[in-house]
Amino acid sequence: MTLFHLFLVAVIQGLTEFLPVSSSGHLILLPNLTGLDDQGQVIDVAVHVGTLGAVILYFWTDVKKALIGLGQLLRGKLATPDAFLALCLIIATIPVVIAGLALKLTGLDDMLRSTAVIGWTMLIFGLVLYWTDQKGETTRVTEGWTLKHATIMGLWQAVALIPGTSRSGITISAARHLGYAREDAARLAMLMSIPTILASGTLLGIEVARTADAASARDGAIAAVFAFIAALLALVFMMRLLRSVSFTPYVIYRCILGVILLWIAYT
C-alpha cells in the first residue's frame, strides 16, 4: 500500500472510531466510492491497535481502576468500586462478542457491507442519537453505572455490528436514553470500546498472524501510529466540545451522508 493510502485509512479509522459517525461504515465506503483497493485485515488490526492505544491513554485513570478491579474480581473480591467497574465492562461486552461470532460464522457480516445498508443505518441511527440526546435526562453520572444499565448498553452496542450504525453512537444513545449526562454517556461509551476493540482486534489478529509478512507488518506499524494520533485528537475534540455543544452536529453530518449514500445506492 502507498503511504497516502495508509494515511487515509488510518486517519478515517482514528477520527471516526470514537466520534458517533461509524468508523466501519466510512472504511467500507472508502473502496466502494473511490475505487481504492480494500486495505485488508492486517491494516484493520493495525488501526484498531492504534485507536485502542489512544482511548487507553486518554482514559488512563478509569482504565487503571478497571485493571485493578479485574485483579480483584479474579481474587473473588466483588465489593470494591474498581471491581464493580470491571464487572460492568465485562457484562457490557458479552452481547457484542456473541453477536459478532454469530455474524462471522453465518457470513452475514459480509452481506451487510453495502452502500445502501450504510446509508440507512447512518440516517436511522443518527435520528436515534438526536432523539435520545434531546429527550434524555442528565441526572446520572459514570459512578452510578449499574449492572442493569451495563447490560442494556451492551445489547445496544451489539447493534453496531451493522455497518454505519456507529459503536460509539449507539452506546451514547443508550446512555442518554438511560439518563446519563452527555460527558458521562461519552465516557462510558469510550470505556466500553476498550474490551470490544480488544476482542475484535484479537480475533482479526489470530486470522492474519499466519499470513503477515515483513512488508505488511511495516505497513501495519505505520497505520497504527497514524490511527493513534488521529483517534487521540478526535477524543480530545469530542470530549471538550461536549461541555458546551450537544451531539446535533454529528446527527446533521450523519443525516446528510445517509441521504447521499441512499441516492447513490438507488440511482
Image: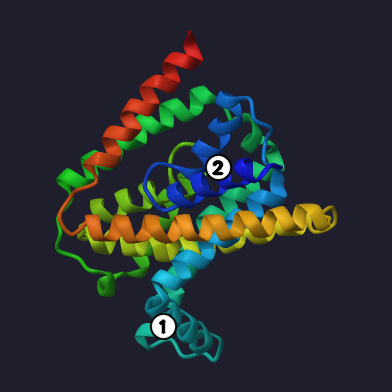
Q: Report whether 135 appears left or right of 250.
A: left
For residue 133, side relative to residue 85 (left or right): left
In percent of width and height, residue 36 lies at 64, 30
* For residue 149, above or below residue 73: above
In the depicted structure, whether residue 127 falls above or below residue 16:
above
Q: Is residue 87 above or below residue 160?
A: below
Corner quadrant of residue 149: bottom left
SS at badge 2: helix
First in sequence: mark 1 or mark 2?
2
- Residue 183: x %, y % from top left: 24, 61
**Residue 142: x, y in percent?**
28, 70
Q: Which residue is mark 1?
A: 65
Q: Position of residue 130 (x, y in %)?
A: 23, 40
Residue under the image location 38 percent in, 88 percent down: 79
- Residue drawn at 32 percent across, 36 percent down: 126
Q: Which residue is mark 2?
A: 8
Q: Nearer the viewer, residue 195 or 217?
A: 217
Q: Is residue 207 left or right of residue 103?
A: right
Amino acid, disc 2: Leu
Examine the image and state in which quarter residue 134 appears.
top left
**Label 1: few (<14), some (14–19) or many (≥20) C-alpha neighbours in 10 Å:** some
SS label for mark 1? helix
- Which mark is on residue 231? none
Q: Is any part of residue 197 visible from this angle?
A: no
Q: Nearer the viewer, mark 1 or mark 2?
A: 2
- Marker count (numbered): 2
The N terminus appears in which quarter of the rendering? top right
Is residue 6 or residue 116 the one in the foreground? 6
